[in-house]
Amino acid sequence: PGMTEDSVIDQLHAADVALSVEAGQMRDHPVIAAAGAASEIADQPPAFTLAAIALGAGLLSRRPRLAEGGGRALAALWLATRTKSAIKSVVVRTRPYKLLEEGHYETGVNGPDSHPYNSFPSGHTADAFAAARAIGRVAPGAKRPLLGLAALIGLVQVPRATHHLADVIAGAAVGIAAEAVVHHALQALPDDRVRAGRRALIRRRGASGNDA
């Protein structure tokens, strides 16, 4: 008899959890610990802060591309964060570290809405991909390196025992989708209005700088 769709999903789920258990054994390795600490750049406070700094620096230095990159990143991060938070509030999935430390695992919907149970999707990965795609729109040469960095940020969450691989994949999808929505919304704006807005912002910042 052939495998049913449910049995395939169950097998993939079991393999995902098994990978988390195996990879999580490395969570205390110095390399994983260091990489995990570095990946915190994609956590909400530093990610939003860096995007805001880029926006402000671009405005103050009259560099429209830098300002646009920061603005795009802020918008994409905001939408990615809202989306992943909405999913986390409904979907329950035990984080790998709790599974490893307590042998407890559960998944489903409308259960505990707390950190040990909101593994799905990975917010770090969502923010990393949202920002990478946003910046890549105005700096095409940086697109591939930034996406590669976003992938590394996501993947290290598995041996770090903070997320399962499926959480990381879902987080990447959330980030990419959020940035795509922001990009298409900006594309819908008339070009003359966008250019006028950029010039006005730069002039305003320049004028305030001269008055200081």
Image (cartoon, rainbow, N blue to C red):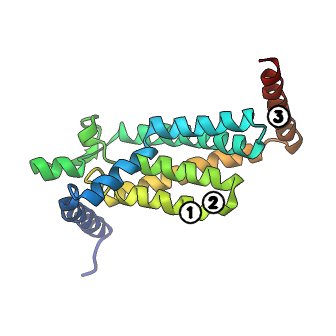
Residue at the outermost top position:
211
**Helix or strand or loop: what does disc 2 sit on?**
helix
Q: Quadrant of residue 35?
A: bottom left
Q: How many marks?
A: 3
Q: Is residue 30 visible?
A: yes
Residue 69 or residue 99, whichever sits in front: 69
**Helix or strand or loop: what does disc 1 sit on?**
helix
Image position of 67 (left or right of 23): right
Q: Amino acid at mark 3?
A: Gly
Image position of 148 (left or right of 92): right
Q: Which mark is residue 197?
A: 3
Whether the residues at callouts 1 and 2 have beta carbons within 8 Å, the answer is yes
- Quadrant of image for the C terminus: top right
Whether the residues at callouts 1 and 3 have beta carbons within 8 Å, the answer is no
Residue occupied by mark 1: 145
Q: Amino acid at mark 2?
A: Ala
From mark 1 to mark 2, how far is it between C-alphas? 6 Å
Image position of 150 (left or right of 165): right
Count residues near mark 1 (Cα–Cα under 10 Å), then give few for <14, some for 14-19, many for 20+.
Answer: few
Q: Is residue 155 above or below residue 116?
A: below
**Helix or strand or loop: what does disc 3 sit on?**
helix
Residue at the outermost left position:
102
From mark 2 to mark 3, how far is it between C-alphas? 25 Å
Residue occupied by mark 2: 142
